Image (cartoon, rainbow, N blue to C red):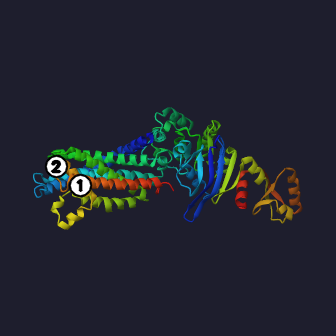
Amino acid sequence: MEGFKTLLYKECLRFWKVGFQTVLSPVLNAVLYLLIFGHVLEDHVQPFPGVNYTAFLVPGLVMMTVLQNAFANSSSSLIQSKITGNIVFVLLPPISYREFYSAYVLAAVLRGSLCGIGVLLAALPFAHLPFAEPLWIVAFALVGGAFLASLGVIAGIWADKFDQLAAFQNFLIMPLTMLSGVFYSIHSLPGFWQGVSHFNPFFFMIDGFRYGFFGVSDVSPWASLGVVTVCFVVLAVLTLQMLARGYKLRA
Amino acid sequence: MSPAIRIAGVTKRFRSLQALAGVDLEVAQGEFFGLLGPNGAGKTTLISSLAGLARPDSGTLEVMGHDVVRDYRAARLALGVVPQELVFDPFFNVREMLRIQSGYFGIRNNDDWIDEILHHLDLTEKASSNMRMLSGGMKRRALVAQALVHRPPVIVLDEPTAGVDVELRHGLWQFIRKLNQDGHTIVLTTHYLEEAESLCGRIAMLKAGRIVALDTTANLLQRFASHTLQLRLAKPVVVSPELEGRVLSRDGLQWTLGFDNFDEVGHLLAGLKSAGAEIVDMALGKPDLEQVFVGVMNQN
């Protein structure tokens, strides 16, 4: 247990030591999105009755920040350790693969949450957020963050160079988050694309998270939580199997 | 008392390369043991298998009686490994790194021991320095410190003096010798054969994934090495077949002849004189591990 706690602490200390890059920068990015999109679309779009566009946008940006940073933390930490070779210091001690997984995922969820809270605090002056169902906010942030953190562990272990990790991030994570309803309600899409959106697990994360703020969503939050939880469990099992086999870590 | 290390029937293949081809080896507790071999002989693969960084295709490995797969926690607690590469985490300073490494091994509040290691390795003043700021030799010593934070009874050093200057190398060996005297088992791989000769009580030589020699250093020297007579001649000569058989190496006019006892020197010189050789320079050499190494590798 001490090994797990130390690895978790090390992973948190790692991102905290470069906080400008890992926390403040994503918060600034999200706030810029909020200011620009909010300013341009505020008077033109009303996604839900009684909810203006800027308020609608905030939970989406918060969740997008949580997800992207949870992924970035585990994936970048692992690939850096692999490429520089210092992963050996985590592989030599008596740390089980479950402890290894839990520490990386939890640290990533913590960084994602910290960034998300930063975006939320920065956005509060710009929008009225009722926080209708706060437990849903917490539940989706945690499960969604853990899903992306697991995906980050897989990407970090699979990628042999930074270029491959960037491809994973830019061709998979980024499109799935941007096309998940962060900036729009899927009811504004044509029927075909509404259907396609239902195959994107990120849509359920954003939609459920947003429900926690407004008590309104495109899909029932229970259904969304079910989808996200199943996706997370499948990914967690897959990641644990990779770690148990020592895939690309233990020759 | 279980051996410090027991390796039985270990094989490992990387695609077409047979890295380990059935290695059997036991290292007793308290030994200073050398693992030698040319590049690609399988030394690092064997160490990696022992440390759980590689998974052998067959065979078993134990550290202090603990199987490295079934009982990996106890086995890893008993083992400290200094890796061959100069690797470090650029986010942390030396003390942070050692505290973190202690925590990985389940040890909290380890600062007293960390201070002692830093003192012995002459790193006390660098405790607050980021690893990136250390010289190569200091990084190497920091790696040694990292392997010792959990006070492992068995310490494996994979080419620990590569790229380290002479003074630091001596300091490092003094410390490692002290650890061995305190009861730690030391397993060393190195390309500096004179180091292995002076430090290791017993030596195994690996070639193409197999152990091709395993004995005490003294026995190996006795079996495979001889005294040498190194000569520089003024001009080329043809010597008798008997004398020709004593020539260990020949590089132009620079000859090296082997002999087992000093009574033979006069006979060798007489043979050379009768062949018309004119000796410009001459030196005697003691048997050394390099001869053993070359001899064993050529035999196999």
Q: Position of residue A238 (x, y in %)?
A: 39, 56
| Residue at 16% over, 61% down | A187
Q: Is residue B184 left or right of residue A150?
A: right
| Residue at 64% over, 44% down | B3
Q: Is residue B289 left or right of residue B178?
A: right
**Chain letter, disc 2 residue:** A
Q: Position of residue A170 (x, y in %)?
A: 32, 60
- Residue A181 lies in quadrant: bottom left
The kind of residue on which mark 2 rests is: Gly
**Chain letter, disc 1 residue:** A
Given residues B241 and A245, the one toward you in this image is A245
Q: Position of residue B120 (x, y in %)?
A: 57, 36
Which mark is drawn over residue A128?
Answer: none
The crowding category of the residue bearing disc 2, from other C-alpha atoms within 10 Å (few below 14, some 14 to 19, many at least 20), is: some
Instruction: For mark 1, give the secondary structure.
Output: helix
| Residue at 29% over, 59% down | A174
Given residues A126 and A190, the one toward you in this image is A190
Which mark is drawn over residue A223?
Answer: 1
